[in-house]
Image: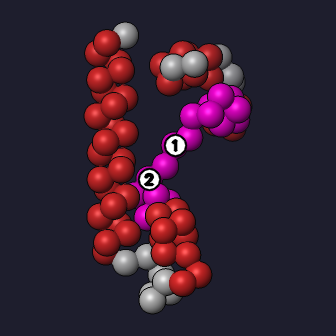
Amino acid sequence: MSVQTAFEEAMHHETPAGVMNSLIQQGVWMTDEDTMTAAIHNVYCGIMADHEHPNEKDRDQARQIIAVIGQRMGAGAEAG
């Protein structure tokens, strides 16, 4: 299912929680820079990290991933 179709289906719910639950059930997740930064730190640095909290490299990688996802979603919307 495309992201656009998932959004169209989710918009039929009456509450924000219903919309978010619908998106999550369809495999569409929303994130922000802080959440993505923490995820990158947890996955790539893990328990062997030489630092306890996400650092600027983790944050930069999060921004890059979000930018690429945005480009892909924009390309998909134009093609659709």
Based on the picture, tell me whether residue 34 belongs to the magenta stretch: yes
Which quarter of the image is occupied by the N terminus? Answer: top right
State the image coordinates of residue 66 (x, y, percent, origin top left): 36, 48
Based on the picture, tell me whether residue 53 belongs to the magenta stretch: no
Reading the image, the residue beneath label 2 is 32
- What sort of colour scheme is used for the picture? secondary structure
State the image coordinates of residue 53 (x, y, percent, origin top left): 48, 81
At 37% from the left edge and 29% from the top edge, which residue is drawn?
73
Q: Quadrant of residue 62?
A: bottom left
Question: What are the residue bounds of the magenta stretch?
Answer: 21-37
Say whether residue 48 is left or right of residue 10: left
Given the current orientation, which residue lies at the most extreme top position?
A: 80
Q: Quadrant of residue 7?
A: top right
Q: Are marks 1 and 2 in contact (CB under 8 Å)?
A: yes
Q: From what the image shows, is residue 38 above or below residue 15?
A: below
SS for tag 1? loop
Say whether residue 64 is left or right of residue 52: left
SS for tag 2? loop
